[in-house]
Image: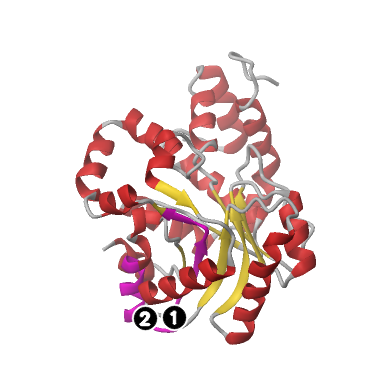
Amino acid sequence: MMLDMAFDLGIRHFDVAPMYGLGRAEAELGQLLSRHPGELSVTTKFGIYPSTLGASLGRTQAPIRFFLRRARTAQDKAKALGASPSSGLLGRALYRARPWDPALARKSLHQSLRALRVDHVEYFALHDPTFGGATSALPVIEFLDGQLDAGSIRCWGIAGHVIDESTLALARSAGRLGMLQFAADILSPGAVGASLPAVETITFGALARALPSIEAHLSRSAAILQYWEGTLGPGLLEHGRLSVLLLSEALRRNKDGTVLFSTTRVAHLKAAASLAESLDLPEAERLAPALSALASDASSVVPHGVGR
């Protein structure tokens, strides 16, 4: 089982939400937590949930995943369209967003605690909120602060691909915001959280966009690949070398926080765990300028040449 293997490899933080796994992720993680009480930390969220259709499909994920593995294009498209209620027709069919209401937040927290088989979680996050400074968010923030005092959560925060500045300002001014979780890769590393030393930073998405973009750039010509291998070392398109570089850079940028990594492949899980354990920060610092330059070239519109 992947979760047990992750634990055996030394991974001690897991990120879930009621919508993940079409409603099944929290219960599956709960089995691991029950076998290792007090040894793991968990982030879960509230605000987005599987629809009735999504929950029913959650019980038949195996054949769906088999089909998507066979059709890579279909898999990528499904991920893009089904990422959230705002990501197209599939997303609206699979998920639903609920209003930011303290009663619903309380219900969601209690359901998550039951599914996870714990009496508290380390991080409880508002999932993709867009308060826009609305005072209607204040009761939810008061509820979250109350749960800190009650011990049901150790920290509350905001999780989303992009965190709206007005949402952040409201949460900071009205409550005890303690965590930000947002997408950050070398193509757009994300500035939110960089100037908030009192807030724990959790980042994700280091590979999803950057890896295929840079791989495509390096594959454009032998000259491009030769140039960058001369700068960053040989084998950039072999044996996961580029993935290691990108994950090393994500860990370097967020060395005092947490970097999330998602995979269903044993080899990738082992590689990521090994990297986290043996990260050479001085080497990552040395390669960072060249890696950033490669990412800049890859994101440019110049179709040929090394772009330098």
Residue that mark 1 sits on: 39
Q: Is residue 115 magenta?
A: no
Q: Residue at x 33, y 52 (%)?
A: 52
Q: Residue at x 49, y 38 (%)?
A: 87
Q: Residue at x 51, y 35 (%)?
A: 234
- State the separation of the CA atoms marked 1 and 2: 6 Å
The C terminus sits in image quarter: top right
Please provide percent x and percent y for residue 45.
51, 63
Please name the amino acid that badge 2 sits on. Answer: His
The N terminus sits in image quarter: bottom left
Image quarter of residue 210: top right
Instruction: Tell me the element at label 2.
Output: loop
In the rendered view, does 203 fall on the left or right side of 271?
right
Please provide percent x and percent y for residue 245.
55, 45
What residue range appears in magenta?
Answer: 27-49
- Foreground pick, 74 / 298: 74
Instruction: Tell me the element at label 1.
Output: loop
Q: Residue at x 21, y 49 (%)?
A: 62
Residue that mark 2 sits on: 36
Q: Is residue 33 magenta?
A: yes
Please name the amino acid that badge 1 sits on. Answer: Glu
Which residue is situated farthest in the bottom direction here? 150
**Mark carried by residue 293:** none
Residue contact at pointers 1 and 2, CB within 8 angstroms = yes
